[in-house]
Image: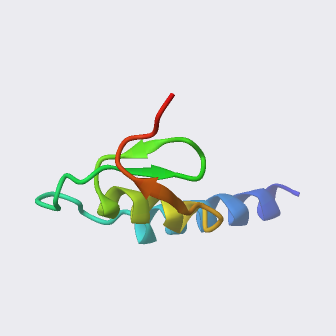
Amino acid sequence: FLVLKAKFLRVDQDKDKECNHHCMGSPQKPVCASNGRTFMSRCEFQRAKCRDPQLEIAYRGSCKG
């Protein structure tokens, strides 16, 4: 059981590396995601979507409410 747990942990860490896009210098144009969270740039949204493929852009601009 411990071996399986270690493998899952490693997969999560690898995914974090894959999803670690550098967003420095990307345009600060906020988008509201389907989870109700505002991302300050499309790049930041893409980084979150990499970890959660279900995530979509609801609309441009900050989330309301």
- Left or right: residue 42 compared with residue 32: left
Residue extending furthest top?
A: 65
Residue 60, placed above or below residue 19: above
Image location of residue 26, percent across then percent down: 17, 62
Work out which quarter of the rendered image holds the N terminus and state it: bottom right
Image location of residue 18, percent across then percent down: 43, 71
Q: Which residue is located at x 59 percent, y 53 percent?
A: 34
Image location of residue 3, percent across then percent down: 78, 62
Q: Quick one: 34 or 9, which is closer to the camera?
A: 34
- Left or right: residue 56 compared with residue 23: right
- Left or right: residue 4 compared with residue 6: right
Q: How many marks?
A: 0
Q: Quick one: 15 or 37, which is closer to the camera?
A: 37
Residue extending furthest left?
A: 25
Q: Quick one: 39 or 24, which is closer to the camera?
A: 39
Residue extending furthest bottom?
A: 18
Q: Which residue is located at x 24 percent, y 63 percent?
A: 22
Q: Which residue is located at x 55 percent, y 62 percent?
A: 51
Q: How is the image coloured?
A: rainbow
Q: Which residue is located at x 55 percent, y 42 percent?
A: 36
- Left or right: residue 48 compared with residue 44: right
